[in-house]
Amino acid sequence: MNCPFCHKNVPLWWYYFHVKGHRRLKADGQHESHITLHPELREQGSLEGVPKVYEHPKCGGMTVMPEKIIRSYLKNPFMYNGKTFCTGCHTYVDDSELFWVETGQRMSEYRLELQRNAR
Ligand SMILES: [Zn+2]
Ligand SMILES: [Zn+2]
């Protein structure tokens, strides 16, 4: 089985425990790893102009989106649901509550825009 987190080939009998390890929570409440596209399938181009930092006005927290996740959802915006980690809240919040610092756009609108363009 190909692991959707680290993209290693994992024997079927070990798959459940392996994936469980990725889902373990870090001390700050964030999941150990996130599902990403295989590195070769990710967006390879420049990320210039692509928003990377988002703010949660409710708590004032700012969070940097990991590059491997950005490059994954640029290629497949359907692989993430509306929940995104906020370093201020130490938990996952709805992306309609988050705003990109670079553009001021609501993250949920940005996601829908990417999804529309991907169709
Ligand atoms: Zn793995
Ligand atoms: Zn927050």
Image: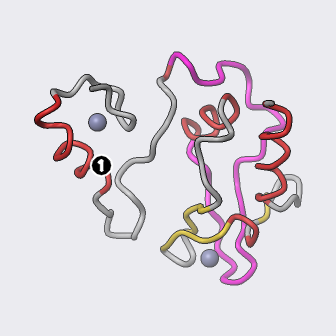
Give the x, y percent position of residue 2.
32, 26
Q: Is residue 101 left or right of residue 52?
A: right
Magenta stretch: includes residue 41: yes
Q: Nearer the viewer, residue 67 or 106?
A: 106
Tell me if residue 34 comes above or below residue 82 in the rendering: above
Q: Name the residue rendered at 71%, 83% in the picture.
A: 58
Give the x, y percent position of residue 73.
65, 37
Magenta stretch: includes residue 32: no
The mark total stands at: 1
Quarter holding residue 43? top right
Alpha-carbon neighbours of circle 1 within 10 Å: few (<14), some, or many (≥20)? some
Quarter holding residue 109? bottom right
Location of ligand 2 given as a quarter of the image: bottom right
Q: Is mark 1 within 8 Å of ligand 1?
A: yes
Which region of the structure is painted magenta? Answer: 40-66
Q: Main secondary structure of the magenta part?
A: loop
Q: Name the residue rendered at 75%, 78% in the picture.
A: 57
Q: Name the residue rendered at 65%, 41% in the picture.
A: 78
Q: Name the residue rendered at 32%, 32% in the picture.
A: 3
Q: Secondary structure at mark 1?
A: helix
Q: Is residue 13 left or right of residue 94?
A: left
Q: Is residue 93 left or right of residue 112?
A: left
Q: Nearer the viewer, residue 27 or 5?
A: 5
Q: Nearer the viewer, residue 76 or 59?
A: 76
- The residue under label 1 is which amino acid type? His
Locate the C terminus by quadrant: top right
Give the x, y percent position of residue 25.
32, 63
Tell me if residue 103 comes above or below residue 26 in the rendering: above
Tell me if residue 49 comes above or below residue 109 in the rendering: above
Residue to which mark 1 is pinned: 22
